[in-house]
Image (spheres, helix red, strand yellow):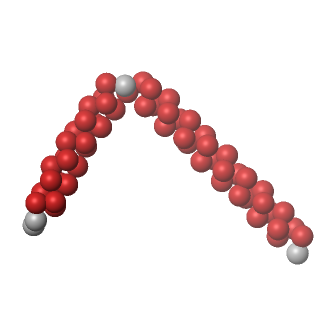
């Protein structure tokens, strides 16, 4: 590996460690955010099914 690969690996490991620490520190906020994201995904899936149903119904 060259120097850029080694530096990228080290920076990536440091960022993963900092991200894990941030998640652990702000765990209640992370849980709320994940719940919100699940709601958004369900909403988008429902909208896709409605549009798909309308397209099928027109044929």
Does 11 sit above or below residue 28?
below
Does 12 sit above or below residue 35?
below
Indicate left or right for 19 with 7 as reference.
right
x and y, in percent, of residue 6 in the image: 12, 57
Number of numbered callouts drawn: 0
Does 57 sit above or below residue 14?
below
Which residue lies most toward the bottom here? 59
x and y, in percent, of residue 2 in the image: 10, 65
Q: Quadrant of residue 56?
A: bottom right
Which residue lies most toward the right here? 58
Residue appearing at x 78%, y 60% in the figure = 51
Indicate left or right for 6 with 33 as reference.
left
Q: Quadrant of residue 5?
A: bottom left
Residue appearing at x 66%, y 53% in the figure = 45
x and y, in percent, of residue 23 in the image: 34, 32
Indicate left or right for 21 with 10 as reference.
right
Please identify the quadrant where the N terminus is shown: bottom left
Residue appearing at x 45%, y 31% in the figure = 31
Please identify the quadrant where the C terminus is shown: bottom right
Indicate left or right for 1 with 56 as reference.
left
Q: Quadrant of residue 55?
A: bottom right
Does 13 sit above or below residue 36?
below
Of residue 35 and residue 6, the one placed in the foreground of this image is 6
């Amino acid at each position: 590996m060259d120097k850029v690969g080694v530096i990228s690996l080290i920076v990536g490991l440091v960022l993963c460690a900092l991200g894990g620490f941030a998640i652990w520190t702000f765990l209640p906020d992370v849980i709320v955010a994940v719940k919100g994201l699940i709601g958004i995904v369900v909403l988008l899936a429902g909208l896709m099914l409605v549009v798909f149903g309308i397209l099928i119904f027109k044929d």
